[in-house]
Amino acid sequence: MVQIMLNLKPYKNLLKQHELSLTAVRLAVLETLEIHPHSDADKIFNIVKNKIATTSKQAIYKNLNALAERGIIREIKPKGRSSLYETRTGDNHHHLVCRQCGAVRDTDCFDHAPCLEPMCNHGFKVDEAEVIFWGLCPPCQKNLIKTERKEK
Amino acid sequence: MVQIMLNLKPYKNLLKQHELSLTAVRLAVLETLEIHPHSDADKIFNIVKNKIATTSKQAIYKNLNALAERGIIREIKPKGRSSLYETRTGDNHHHLVCRQCGAVRDTDCFDHAPCLEPMCNHGFKVDEAEVIFWGLCPPCQKNLIKTERKEK
DNA sequence: CAAAAATATTGATTGATTAAATATTTTTTG
DNA sequence: CAAAAAATATTTAATCAATCAATATTTTTG
Ligand SMILES: [Mn+2]
Ligand SMILES: [Mn+2]
Ligand SMILES: [Zn+2]
Ligand SMILES: [Zn+2]
């Protein structure tokens, strides 16, 4: 087991700025997301439980919502999966998602990008461009090739 | 009430090509989606029910899945909403979604576009770029301005 | 038209998320 | 620092979209 020490001070300040109390569960959620980006509520719950045995799923959900509402964390929801959360915010980065195993990777926003500029905006005032690149991650590509060989 | 006559022959052919039987519910679902793009299962169910009083939600769901699996219709799932379906397929077009009222509009894929080319693909083999532009539709922008005036 | 295959209907079930009520913790205030 | 007030956590129940399973009906095939 690896022990990672995280500096939570920046988060404590952030919470204060947003007038959110400093609670054990809340900090544990943030710490968990810092170490395991793109986790869902269930995974976060299980990790937090190791530290705070009495915690509840409900507390995890409420905190995730409270933090996401304030932009302290970001929520993404690839089709067919439960919501995933991450602490990397404000850069409108995008995601690669594996159709096979569900792996999620970050990929930067195109800098020169048409990102907030659709071809035709129909009068919409766009403030966010959410992009998911669907495909196969490297390991799943290899497995696919293996499977194809077997089928022959 | 407006009576719209749709030519369902192309759909009938498509279904045959995909070895799907020609059933009343299935055709009604396609017809509904042709007239009301970006509808969810519940809306489709209610519309189809007007034609086929005995239909069931289950039949709607199964048909939507069968059609989507074969690429005859396309499913999109903006965060926080149930799945929406449409008959416009194969062009990987994108969507504008209103944060306020949920309105959905089509917008073409950038033709020159980095669409299938993320900044860094981490070895992923990308086959689809799903893009949602979040913002406010024209009516909701107006309402917002009104509300702001009242608050003063 | 009859048999086989596909689909529809009905009713029950899952899984993620939210809601409501009470208990505990955190913050504020004196 | 010790109430009192406010915020959060815990527990339990509820919601909602979507799926599963069994049986009935429709569609296709020969
Ligand atoms: Mn990310
Ligand atoms: Mn569309
Ligand atoms: Zn994979
Ligand atoms: Zn709107």
Image (spheres, coloured by chain):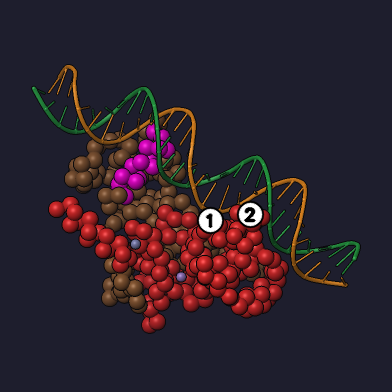
Chain colours: A brown, B red, C green, D orange
| Side of D7 where B63 appears, left or right | right
Is residue A67 shown to the viewer in this render? yes
Task: Judge whether residue B70 is colored magenta.
Answer: no
* Quadrant in which residue B101 is drawn: bottom left
Pointer 2 indicates a residue of which chain?
B
Q: Amino acid at mark 2?
A: Ser
Q: Picture coordinates of residue B102 (x, y %)? A: 39, 60
| Side of A131 where B52 appears, left or right | right
Q: CA distance from mark 2 to mark 1?
A: 10 Å
Q: Which residue is mark 1?
A: B42
Q: Which residue is mark 2?
A: B56
Residue plotted at (24% across, 45% down):
A11
Is residue B121 shown to the viewer in this render? no
Q: Picture coordinates of residue B105 (x, y %)? A: 40, 69
Q: Picture coordinates of residue C9 (x, y %)? A: 68, 52
Residue plotted at (39% across, 74% down):
B107
Q: Which span is picked out in magenta?
A: A55-68
Q: Quadrant of the C terminus of chain A?
A: bottom right
Earlier in the chain: of badge 2 and badge 1, it is 1
| Side of B147 where B63 appears, left or right | right
User: Secondary structure of the magenta portion, mostly?
Assistant: helix
Q: Amino acid at mark 1?
A: Asp
Pointer 1 indicates a residue of which chain?
B
Residue plotted at (52% across, 70% down):
B2
Q: Residue furthest front?
A: B1
Residue plotted at (61% across, 66% down):
B28
Instruction: Give the camera-side residue of B12 and B81.
Output: B12
| Side of C1 where A137 appears, left or right | left
